[in-house]
Image (cartoon, rainbow, N blue to C red):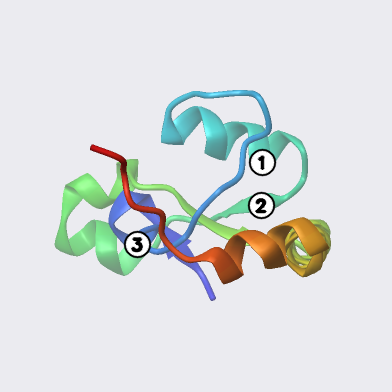
Amino acid sequence: MERAGPRRLRGVQVRVPARVGTLYRTLQRMRVEGLIEEIGVNAVAVAADRRAERRRSYRITPAGRATAREEARRLAAMLASDAAQRLLQRGPRRMAK
């Protein structure tokens, strides 16, 4: 699935270990690391709206998909740990007055 710009990134979370930056820096870093690749400008969209030529569209690469799977496995293992299970079973704690 191809997505572009912040509006289409709603619902997509990007984990950036120990580095914080803007969305565009994160996209640039992911592109440089080979996790995503920029795809061409849509000529029809540009003809309809000149602002479209500034928009960038990206798609996930095979390396990016492998990295996402690895991260999902890591998170699943973390949630399956005894400590996580105890935390999840406790439920919300009430604040003392």
Closer to the camera, 15 or 50?
15
Give the farthest residue toward the front. 97
Please give the label number shown on residue 36. 2
Q: Position of residue 61 (x, y in %)?
A: 74, 61
**Comes first in the chain, label 1 or label 3:** 3
Picture layout, residue 71 above or below residue 1: above
Q: Which residue is mark 3?
A: 8
Q: Position of residue 10 (x, y in %)?
A: 35, 60
CB atoms of marks 1 and 2 within 8 Å:
yes
Residue density around tag 1, few if under 14, some if 14–19, many if 20 or more, within 10 Å? some
* Image quarter (top left, top right, bottom left or bottom right) of the C terminus: top left
Give the farthest residue toward the left. 49
Picture layout, residue 86 above or below residue 51: below
Amino acid at the residue labelled 3: Arg
Distance of label 1 from label 2 (alpha carbons): 5 Å
Residue density around tag 2, few if under 14, some if 14–19, many if 20 or more, within 10 Å? many
Distance of label 2 from label 3 (alpha carbons): 15 Å
Residue density around tag 3, few if under 14, some if 14–19, many if 20 or more, within 10 Å? few
Distance of label 1 from label 3 (alpha carbons): 17 Å
Amino acid at the residue labelled 1: Arg
Drawn side of residue 29 relative to residue 45, left or right? right
* Image quarter (top left, top right, bottom left or bottom right) of the N terminus: bottom right
For image coordinates 55% across by 34% down, the residue present is 26
Q: Position of residue 35 (x, y in %)?
A: 73, 50
Amino acid at the residue labelled 2: Ile
For image coordinates 43% across by 55% down, the residue present is 41
